Amino acid sequence: MFKVATSLALVTWVSACSSMLPVSHSNASSFQSFEEARNAVVTLVPMKSSKKIGQREGVDFAKQPNTKILTHSDVVRLLVPAGLLKREDLDPGILVCVEARDACNGLEITASRIAKTRTGNFFADFINYRQRTETTGWRFNALILYVDDLVVYRSWGGQPKVDELDVSTRPLGPFQEMGPSLVSSGR
């Protein structure tokens, strides 16, 4: 009877330990969702909207985390590949920006909310036998070009839904990493 009680207690303890697995969150944006970020960029109408439109809507793109401020030379390097496209192939907003020289600047916005959760058996994870990581969230990127205060170009993209599963199995568990070091130390 004692063996059964001990076994049952051990199984209960090990299965309850999954809550001890690591969890990490990356909130690299003040936007709460992909849709919110997309809507903020879509409200900007090229050749009509100004920088102040975004600020009035409560979104100051230049103050967003992970936003890169682009100079004229950055815009040229990013959007005008040497010899691949003709002038007429470029978006009119990009042409206006390139021709404006120093009056041209832009913002490259990278926003995301990602959560990584280790799931599965605590003991198998702890001894590095099997680790299971679930990644969920969203990733958004946008490019906005300005000439002085006027929005001349905007585009957006990204992953509205991130749902990834990474399973790593090491048949030798904690001894898996010893193999290469034993072979190299024997030389």
Image (cartoon, grey):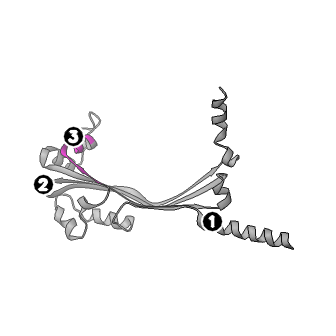
Mark 3 → mark 2, Cα distance in angstroms: 22 Å
Q: Is residue 87 magenta?
A: no
Mark 1 → mark 2, Cα distance in angstroms: 55 Å
Secondary element at image label 1: helix
What's under tag 1, amino acid-wise? Ser
Q: Residue 84: give x, y in percent of width and height.
A: 29, 35
Q: Residue 95: give x, y in percent of width and height.
A: 18, 46
Residues marked 3 and 2 touching at CB (< 8 Å) = no
Residue drawn at the location 12% of the way across and 49% of the way down: 103
Residue drawn at the location 23% of the way across and 45% of the way down: 75
Residue drawn at the location 60% of the way across and 57% of the way down: 132
All told, the count of numbered labels is 3
Q: Residue 28: give x, y in percent of width and height.
A: 37, 60
* Residue with the mark numbered 1: 18
Residue drawn at the location 67% of the way across and 52% of the way down: 129
Mark 3 → mark 1, Cα distance in angstroms: 58 Å
Give neighbour class at mark 2: few <14, some 14-19, many 20+ (Cα, 10 Å): some
* Residue with the mark numbered 2: 148
Q: Give left or right: position of 32 versus 143.
A: right
Whether residue 145 is visible to the viewer of this picture, yes or no, is: yes
Quadrant of the image for the C terminus? top right
Residues marked 1 and 2 touching at CB (< 8 Å) = no
Q: Residue 86: give x, y in percent of width and height.
A: 24, 38
Whether residue 100 is visible to the viewer of this picture, yes or no, is: no
Q: Which residues are magenta?
A: 67-77
Residues marked 3 and 1 touching at CB (< 8 Å) = no
Q: Residue furthest right?
A: 1
In the rendered structure, which disc, 3 or 1, sits on the residue that comes first in sequence? Answer: 1
Give neighbour class at mark 3: few <14, some 14-19, many 20+ (Cα, 10 Å): few
* Residue with the mark numbered 3: 87
**On screen, residue 164 above or below 58:** above
